[in-house]
Amino acid sequence: SAVISQKPSRDICQRGTSLTIQCQVDSQVTMMFWYRQQPGQSLTLIATANQGSEATYESGFVIDKFPISRPNLTFSTLTVSNMSPEDSSIYLCSVQLGLDQPQHFGDGTRLSIL
Amino acid sequence: GQNIDQPTEMTATEGAIVQINCTYQTSGFNGLFWYQQHAGEAPTFLSYNVLDGLEEKGRFSSFLSRSKGYSYLLLKELQMKDSASYLCAVSGYNQGGKLIFGQGTELSVKP
């Protein structure tokens, strides 16, 4: 499986600011995804990060709030914009090496907004 | 749409066997995954079923019945370190590989 590096691992941010989370993979992967895990909850898919084109967002998530970049097959970023306390969550990137392959997750970014 | 149900929490005794069930409804089923997530950590992949039957991997086994929309994860010879959340996730055909996760089952292993 691929080695996934996600950073920062955690951050405490002020209301109204934005934070960009990075996800780096040690090999080229076609599929990359971004998830949110709110306290005590399961994982919710935010979007599929598409290389060279706009991300595909799930219902309830919009590009203005969660802009995503995917400049190449090994790297993606997720920005959480204009943060509020409700955005306090763990944000995880995942990669999938093929359609019949499992997704593997980065270690996550624990975000707290004051 | 897709719907996935699993028990919220379970308790079992060290050395015992526990079965965690997962039922799902999805259009165009293309595989079911089980993940383990310890508190404060990222999910780690446990098993994958796309055909009916039992997949065994050491102390962990996973079963799938596509006609019943049903899967279970079987953990044998439970150890204290098996205390974790177990997540069932379903992949839909023509969904580009994305996974829909159930709410997770919090397993507590007692001595």
Image (cartoon, grey):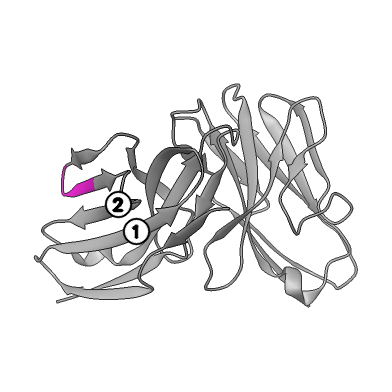
Q: Which residue is mark 1?
A: B22
Q: Chain of mark 2?
A: B
Residue B22 at what x, y percent from top left?
34, 59
Q: Secondary structure at mark 1?
A: strand
**A69 above or below A114?**
above
Local packing at callout 2 (Cα closer than 10 Å; few below 14, some 14-19, many 20+) is: many
Horizontal placement of A36 versus A1: left or right?
Answer: right
* Residues at circles 1 and 2 in contact by the CB criterion of under 8 Å: yes
Q: Specify whether residue B61 is painted magenta.
A: yes
Q: Name the residue nearer the viewer: B102 or A26.
A: B102
Q: Name the residue located 51 percent from the left edge and 33 percent from the top edge.
A: A3
Q: Name the residue nearer the viewer: A33 or B92.
A: B92
Horizontal placement of B95 versus A71: left or right?
Answer: left
Local packing at callout 1 (Cα closer than 10 Å; few below 14, some 14-19, many 20+) is: many
Dominant secondary structure of the residues highlighted in magenta in the image: strand
Camera sees residue A43 = yes
Which label sits on residue B71? Answer: 2
Camera sees residue A113 = no
